[in-house]
Amino acid sequence: MSALVLLTPDAPDGRIADPEAPQLLVTDLGVVRGDGIFETLLAVGGRPLQLEAHLDRLASSAEALDLTLPDGAHWRAAIETGLAEFARRHGDGEAMIRLVGTRGVDAAGPPTCWVYLQPVPAGNRELRDRGLDVVLLDRGYSSEAASVAPWLLLGSKTTSYAVNMAALRYAHRQGADDAVFVSSDGRVLEGPTSTVLIARTRDGVRELVTPLLRSGILAGTTQGALFATAEPAGWQLGYGPLTPEDLIGNDGVWLASSVRLLAPIRSVDGRQIPVSAELTDELTELLLTATRR
Ligand code: PLP
């Protein structure tokens, strides 16, 4: 139920490979050390959404890791090949596309790069409709960590996601659906796989607010796309700093990400917060307008 395209030195635009067969060497540094980067994006009707934003972020993650990866033209070609193969196998339903680039088996040699496409995991729509119960989890770093310790790679999308997955498992063990990281100095950061978005009304003006980028969070392509269309639609835009209290007393809070889109939060550490289906629909429509461009 998937498709795979490998980008190799002799096939820089990618060649189709068998997603069910072993493809990686056990010495690949991406596996051994989590030394690599990735992007996850959605394709609808055979068209990848926000492709350029994802390729830009892939390039900035690569730069942060001193990784030399194929340029955008090769990734675009490989994605196109992958989408055609995915459509041949599954029709043109929604696809989740993962771009991965690792340091390869030898830091001096070529990176290992691939494009993997699979159907969108089930359950996203139910969570979007029902709303998420989240727990706040201390990330253990201050909101200054990204600038004083750039080697932590806090704003990069590295394949070292074991911490993010552990946070999700921890949240699930508490009976929650997801988590929101908080810095050691009490700032709201992001979800393990999502950006936090708040809607509030001040003096009759509707505002969309997201945490400060320089607090060590990933620059979300979903948040970026939504902000681009929300402003001309009359929303005022704001960038943190936000504290946990800001999650409670406002018009709505969402976790935004490329595949799940906007999932409203309905409780934070067991405290109920307002969920407005109308606001979710309005913002999702603005987001989809942006991604259709
Ligand atoms: N923050 C983190 C840590 C993420 O892993 C993700 C997506 O996976 C996001 C934010 C949201 O980014 P995007 O909207 O580009 O999917």
Image (spheres, rainbow, N blue to C red):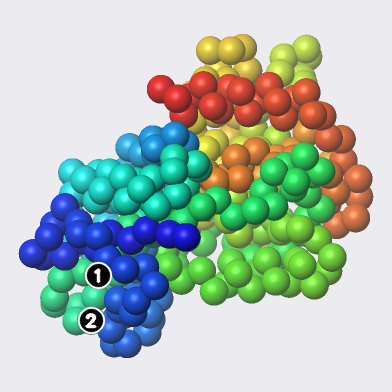
Q: Secondary structure at mark 2?
A: loop
**Residue 25 percent location from the top left of the image:** 28, 84
Mark 1–mark 2 Cα distance, whole angstroms, equals: 8 Å
Asked whether 19 or 222 is in front, the reply is 19
Q: How many marks?
A: 2
Instruction: Tell me the residue at 70%/35% (across/down).
Output: 198
**Residue 220 percent location from the top left of the image:** 50, 43
Q: Secondary structure at mark 1?
A: strand
Mark 1, ligand 1, within 8 Å: the answer is no
Instruction: Tell me the residue at 33%/79% (across/down).
Output: 22
**Residue 89 percent location from the top left of the image:** 40, 52
Q: Evaluate whether residue 113 shows in this view.
A: no
Q: Residue furthest left?
A: 10
- Would residue 78 be found to the left or right of residue 10 on screen? right
The numbered mark, 1 or 2, whose residue comes first in the sequence reads 2
- Would residue 78 be found to the left or right of residue 244 on screen? left
What residue would you read off at disc 1? 112
Instruction: Tell me the residue at 33%/57% (across/down).
Output: 115
Residue 105, label in figure: 2
Vertical placement of 165 versus 218: above or below? below
* Residue 50 lies in quadrant: top left
Instruction: Mark 1 and mark 2 in contact? Answer it, CB < 8 Å.
Output: yes
Instruction: Tell me the residue at 58%/12% (across/down).
Output: 233
Q: Evaluate whether residue 239 shows in this view.
A: yes
Q: Amino acid at mark 2?
A: Val
Vertical placement of 63 versus 293: above or below? below
Q: Residue furthest right?
A: 271
Mark 2, ligand 1, within 8 Å: the answer is no
Q: Amino acid at mark 1?
A: Thr
